[in-house]
Image (spheres, rainbow, N blue to C red):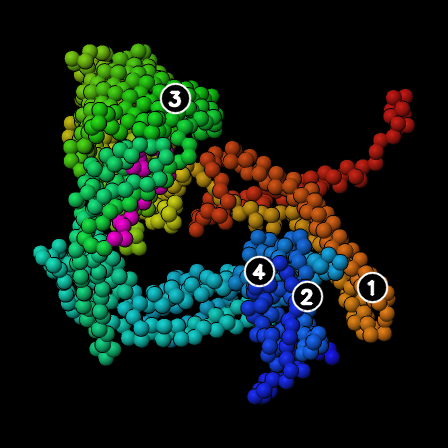
Amino acid sequence: MCLILSTIPAAADEEPKSTPTIDEALQIKEIEFEGIMEDSEGLIKSIIQTRVGEEISPYQLSQDSKNLYKDTGFFEEILVDVEPAEGGGLKVIYRLIPNPKIEGNINIIGNEQLKYKKIKEAISLKPGELFNGQRLWRSKQNVLKTYKEAGYYLAEVQTHKDINSDANTIAVTFEITEGQRIKVQEINFIGNDNLSPKSLSKQMKTRTGKHFDEIFFEEDLTILVRYYQDAGFNQARISKHEKRFSDDKTELMLDITIDEGPQFIVGKYTVELTHSEKPAFSEEKIRDILSPAEGEIFNRGEFEATLAEIEGEYQNKGYLLSQVDASPNFDEISGIVDLTLNINEGDVIVIGDVHINGLEKTKDNVIRRELDQLDIKPGEFYDVQALRKARQRVFRMGPFIRNVEFVPSNSEGAIRDLIVTITESPRTGLLSLGGGYGTEGGIFGVAQIGENNLWGRAFQVHLKGELGARDRHTGELRFSTPWILGTPTRFSTSLYNTQRTHRYYGSIFRDRGYDRYTYKRVGGSLTFGRPISKNTDLSIRLKNESVDASGSGVTTIEDRLTRSITLSLGRDTRDYQRSVHEPVSGSHNSLSYEYAGGFFGADNKFQKYSADSSWFLTSWFNHVLAGHVRTSYLSSQSTDWRFLYYERYRLGGIDTVRGYEDFEIFPINANGEINFNGGNKVLYANLEYRIPFANQLTGVLFFDIGQVWDESITNVFNEFQLKKGAGVGIRFDLMGMLARLEWGYGFDRTVEGGFGAAAENNFKLGVVDTQRVFENFTKAQEANEILRAAQDRLTNELKGIQQEIGTMEERLEKQRLFLDASETQTLEADIRLKGQELQGKLEIGQESIMAKREELLAPLTQDIENLLQQVGESEGYSLILEKRLVTLYVDPKYDLTEKVLTLLNDAYEKEKSKDAQQSATPPETETGKEGEKSN
């Protein structure tokens, strides 16, 4: 007796009723497995429910087959044989035919717009794993979904399988026809009675005329609801959204139906405080923070920010377990929302032990002493603001610190250990060789060697040398330590030899013979600093320096010696959360006094008084308003001002008043003339609005003012004509270093000897859309046509072979019952050979196309890079960036794409015209030459 069950059609749909007794002739005596794979026997036995000793059940055998096929995905086919067992009863044999193993990489052809890597992420099949038909189908659907999300609604995906029966392997190919990317034709809002379509559209990433992105659109629906909630419509929702396509499915119309609900006004606030002893904050203090105010429109985002601010105030006082919840009561009839704040202060959490983990080279006390200075030690309460400041201090010890984390232990109670986890840089030494080009110094080279954590004690030693083509020479040796003699007294010393040339680019300077001036400084300094409170620091600096100054318009000054002492008092309450370069709140204020000459001797005698103040305020959406003011006064006892030319004040440039060239703002004396020698009084201020786009990217809007006055102006308020500049910028946090790209407009900039408005780029930058250049560069289009034709030829050839394989397989299936074993094997061998031919054609064809692509497109890439370099050098660009990678918005005047395209296409047309002329001119023969000679 032999019973064969297949996994596809069920042997029986319902289990027959069991009999009270077992017929020994139908009792299962043995169960065997054929084709079982290594490490899978336990899994297989756990899935099947047929047991030795039970009566045979066709229904259960069918279910076992289905469950093995579905739950494992290991097998291409599962057969169950039932035959008589020795000694009576039945023997059940599970014949398992495993799926073939996926050989080589998953092949993807036809993808031009989406990268191979992105498509591969949507495919769950992996090389070396067993093939699974269900996963192949799901992968196909995922690839289609990926294209749909990118706006390619017309994309088609076909899958091809090439099976090697001998090796039991399979090669899988995804053939993609991308189609045209769909664009948004219109966006319609339905039900928006209170907010205009224009205001709603501004909130969305999806825009008319732009390509449609499914992921962006799903995000937009959430953004719209949030926008309504911030406008007081707390119950607003998107009740329906529909997509309508044009007839050719290249354009999309979006219909968004909104159920606005009522708009709510804040009625009254109720504050319910739960505290153990004396409350940390009074109810009045909490009410001062609350926003929006009673009677104002209920802005959900503003209110949630208020709750976060209140919770932050509690955490800064050590109430880490505080809970701030709100219970709103919305009255739909009156449109009033009453808000109850439930604040449970909890207990003040006190620091138990401080555990410092992760140190490999750095000594434990180097970190612990910084924490002690901020009262982060056993017995003190957890101060979140102090922890953030400690993080900043540890970071600023040097680049040998990569990360710092503070985490309270999970223990119960009011006393909890503080876990400090330090991630050190694996390399603390520095050896670098480099160079570059700058508009000021021309070509320069730099060499530097140093150690940032000498002996694990945060000692820093650096030796730096720099050599430039335009009188740019620097040599410097520096040493610094944050502590000396076991006290929080920082110490640094330096020896330096620096030569710089500053060039004047404005015509007003060159017309008066001021082309440039060069100064050379040789000297050294000693600096000591010590905190006198948690946020206040006192420092003293001793300097011994010799200076030469010379240049057109400047009297040559040789070997003027300066010996000075500088006293500085500073208070720093800045709070850093996102970056050590970008404070979000607090301030930094300092006063300094420099005294030169007198009992120190030397040539130069002067006194400098300076005051500097910076403050930071977090506004909505984590934006930061930053202000900075600096003023300084130089009192000279030297007999000639020229001896202090290099100490006097000039403004302009990225660090003072932007929108003006470096040192372009000079004082105007009492006679109304420009004093090109600089001033002895200076004042400038900067106001910035900083917008964080990401953790390492910040946008800046700025407004600067400043002016310089000389000795002839005794009352600056009578001549208080401040220069103004404004602009925008981008700042990058690059591995702990801050890169600034800023564009300024000087409203009162000197032009052609007069005063007028003119724009000045402190850093001239351009952008170019290289993808668009490639798409519209005639030579690239011709190259792509060649590649596309080659791809089409390969695709057609592969389709032909696939059709042959399909025909052969169909013929084999139809004739299998009429063929003997040898004829069947011959036909199967022919199919395998044809499959190997397909795989070979595919691999060779793809390699050939890739080689051709490299041959055609690599020179074009080089042509574009060469042209960009020429444009950058000829037009004075400091940096040219890829538009698609780095810009959210750019003024069209900075976009070089059209210019680059025009230059490339014009050059190519000239090249083709020249080639055509050469091919039309017949080559000169030797006979002709002989004739010319004889004539």
Mark 4–mark 1 Cα distance, whole angstroms, equals 33 Å
Give the Cα separation between the discs numbered 4 and 3: 54 Å
Q: Position of residue 340 (x, y in %)?
A: 18, 68
The residue that appears at 29% across and 40% down in the rendered structure is: 356
Q: Which residue is mark 4?
A: 124
Residue displayed at 36% across by 32% down? 361
Kindly report the distance in space between the C-alpha atoms of the residues bearing marks 1 and 3. Answer: 78 Å
Look at the numbered disc 1 and give the secondary structure of its residue.
helix
Which mark is drawn over residue 463? 3
Q: Which residue is mark 2?
A: 34
Q: Quadrant location of the N terminus?
A: bottom right
Which mark lies nearer to you, 4 or 1?
Answer: 1
Which residue corresponds to the image point at 25% horizontal and 53% vertical from the top-left? 411
Marks 1 & 3, CB-CB < 8 Å contact: no
Query: Residue 250 lies in magenta, yes or no?
Result: no
**SS for tag 4?**
loop
Q: Amino acid at mark 1?
A: Gln
The magenta-colored residue range is: 394-411
Circle 2 — which element?
Answer: strand
